[in-house]
Amino acid sequence: MQIKLILSLLMQHVIIGGINRQEGQDAIHKLNGKFGKDRAHFMDCDVTNECDFDNLFTETRRIFGYPDILFNNAGMLEDKKWSQTVDVNIKGVLLGCFLAFKYMGKDQEGGKGGVVVNNASILGFDACAGCPVYNCTKHAVIGITKALGAEFHYKRTCIRVCSICPGVTNTELVTGAKGRQYMGEWGEETARQLSQLPQQEIGATGQAFMYIVRHGISAEHYIIEGSEVFHAKPPPRQTFSTLKRSFKKD
């Protein structure tokens, strides 16, 4: 649904990278049947593999010219595979940002700038006791976005780096989360917490993505929850810190 909206309203071409070739090819067949021949392409890409990810950019440039937008969308909610979850959710996002700077940055030959949207989560702000690994990786994505979207980088690259932070969305990532956590009772707690939050369909996240591409401010975060977009601005730590003791010497 997200890609259909993007192709119909925003982009001329889309290249999808992923590790499931059959699903990718099926998606491309449907998209090109609806929107026209060669509007969408699929490439094998493991986002934790720098060579794979680099090749995604170089092939995009070869076929269509320099890319304008990167959606760092790969993610896992599977604390049973906690090491892989960290690699995909953190290393994959970092690699995507670094390669976007390399191939899209205005300071690079042929680069025009553009937009990077990192897929974070409302759990980049909140805690979920049942999935602590996923939870910490999404906090990391918030930090990556704040750092790489800062003016220091933007004034050099002209790339806006923003994060989209979906709430509970009707996807397999969420519906299958209960059975994929580190311990059985942790999965039950994850399902319990998620069930208490507002629900939404994936189409809402597609609309939010397009809003961020058009209007998002670099280094800022946008929550899409209950099919509504919120601009999230965490306050400076000084505004919520309470002094308990001083160790300064007189």
Image (cartoon, rainbow, N blue to C red):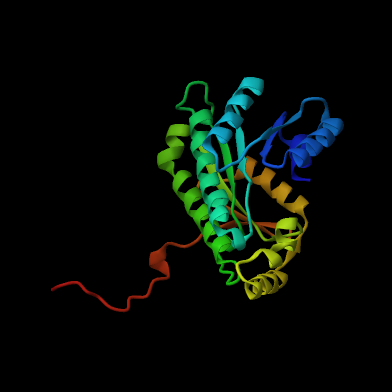
Q: Which residue lies furthest to the bottom in this view?
A: 244
Q: Where is residue 191 in the image (x, y as percent from the top left)?
A: 70, 70
Asked if residue 170 lies left or right of residue 180, the reply is right
Number of numbered discs overlaid on the protein picture: 0
Residue 20, compared with residue 240, is above or below; it is: above
Q: Quadrant of residue 249?
A: bottom left
Q: Where is residue 162 in the image (x, y as percent from the top left)?
A: 56, 46
Asked if residue 72 lies left or right of residue 246, the reply is right
Q: Residue furthest right?
A: 33
Q: Which of 77 and 33 is in front in this view?
A: 77
Q: Position of residue 245 (x, y in %)?
A: 28, 78
Instruction: Name the quarter where the C terminus is drawn.
Output: bottom left
Q: Which of 227 and 108 is in front in this view?
A: 108
Residue 235, compared with residue 50, is above or below; it is: below
> Residue at position x 62%, y 20% from top?
62
Q: In which quarter of the image is residue 165?
A: bottom right
Instruction: Name the quarter where the N terminus is drawn.
Output: top right
> Residue at position x 58%, y 72% from top?
129
Q: Nearer the viewer, residue 219 or 34?
A: 34
Asked if residue 74 lies left or right of residue 148, the reply is right
Residue 245, compared with residue 91, is above or below; it is: below
> Residue at position x 79%, y 40% from top?
4
Q: Where is residue 55 in the image (x, y as percent from the top left)?
A: 58, 29
> Residue at position x 67%, y 46% from top?
209
